[in-house]
Every structure is written in structure tokens, then in C-alpha cells.
Amino acid sequence: MIQILNIDDVSVVSSSNFLRTRELLSPTNREGLYVNIDEVEPGGYSAKHHLHTLQDEFFLVLQGQGLARINNELHPVVAGDFFAKPAGSVPHQFFNNGTVTLKILDCGIARQGDSIVYADDQVVWLKSLGMAFKLSDALRVWSSIPNK
């Protein structure tokens, strides 16, 4: 069934000091597609600098201005700016350096087995296990072959 939603009528599903997220389409749908509106207050970040290993993402700035940190380069963004990020490509985050709420349409395809790498913290979050690990603790040599 098709449902028409108005952004102002959609409840906030997560909130922190400077960030609110409204979920327009949950990734639990059959295709794994999700659609969120992220509202970042002045001086706030949309997320920690991160990348998804299996999740393609697409962003459209709806309101305000800010900086998109893509890899380690800062790109000014304003309402109307769009970019797409293939899974596993580059870490990203938004920072609101303006004076009004930065609203971002955040869409993507959530795939099972996705992990999130937080580049600045050198941490990987294994979503399927609900656990995070420091990359410095990674085994450099290991084999799954038995009797070896």
C-alpha cells in the first residue's frame, strides 16, 4: 500500500545533542532501501567519520549549509547539493557550519553483513554481531583451514 508522508508529521527515531533523524522508509522493507531526513543543528555533526562496507548511500542537502567531509577533504555544501557514495568507497560525515538547521535527505541500500568502519577512531562495528573492535587488535595472520 502506498502511503504519502509529510516530513513534519514523521516522528524522530533517534536524537542526540545536535542531530535528529526522521525515518521515512525503514530498511526492513524487502529491498533494504532506507530513506531518512537528518537534521543537524549549527555546530553539530551528522555522524562520526565512517564508511559502510556493503551499504550504498545517497545524500541531498535540503536546507542550510555545511561541510561534507569525504575521505579527508572538506567540501562546502548548500541546499540542492547531491552526492552518491558506493559501498566501501570513502568515509564521510557532514558538519553544520551555518546558522540554521542543516537538513539532509539520506538514502541508501542496507545490506545484511554490512560493517561500519570509523576511520578517526580506527574502530570497526560488526552490525550483525552488535560488537565493535579496534583495528589495532586485528590478527595479521590467521587461517580457517582445520588441522593446520
Image: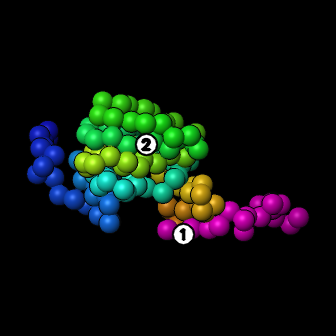
Please identify the quadrant where the C terminus is shown.
bottom right
Judged by depth in the image, the label closer to the viewer, 2 or 1, is 2
Left or right of 97? Residue 92 is: right
Look at mark 2 in the image and give the residue it sits on: 67
Q: Is residue 13 above or below residue 96?
A: below
Examine the rendering and report whether any part of residue 31 can be seen. no
Which amino acid, mark 2?
A: Leu
Count of marks overlaid on the render: 2
Residue 131 bears which disc, if any? Answer: 1
Q: Nearer the viewer, residue 135 or 61?
A: 61
Residue 63, percent across and down? 25, 39
Residue 135 falls inside the magenta stretch: yes
Q: Which residues are magenta?
A: 130-148
Q: Is residue 121 above or below residue 5?
A: below
Residue 85 falls inside the magenta stretch: no
Q: Is residue 81 above or below residue 143?
A: above
**Residue drawn at 81 percent across, 60 percent down:** 140
Residue 70, percent across and down? 52, 41
Which amino acid, mark 1?
A: Met
Other-residue count near label 2 (Cα within 10 Å), few / some / many at <14 / 14–19 / ≥20: some
Quarter of the image for residue 57 reads top left
Residue 75, percent across and down? 48, 36
**Distance between mark 2 and mark 1 Cα atoms:** 30 Å
Q: Secondary structure at mark 1?
A: strand
Task: Report the predominant secondary structure element of the magenta stretch.
Answer: loop
- The numbered mark, 2 or 1, whose residue comes first in the sequence reads 2
Left or right of 82? Residue 8 is: left
**Residue drawn at 29 percent across, 34 percent down:** 79
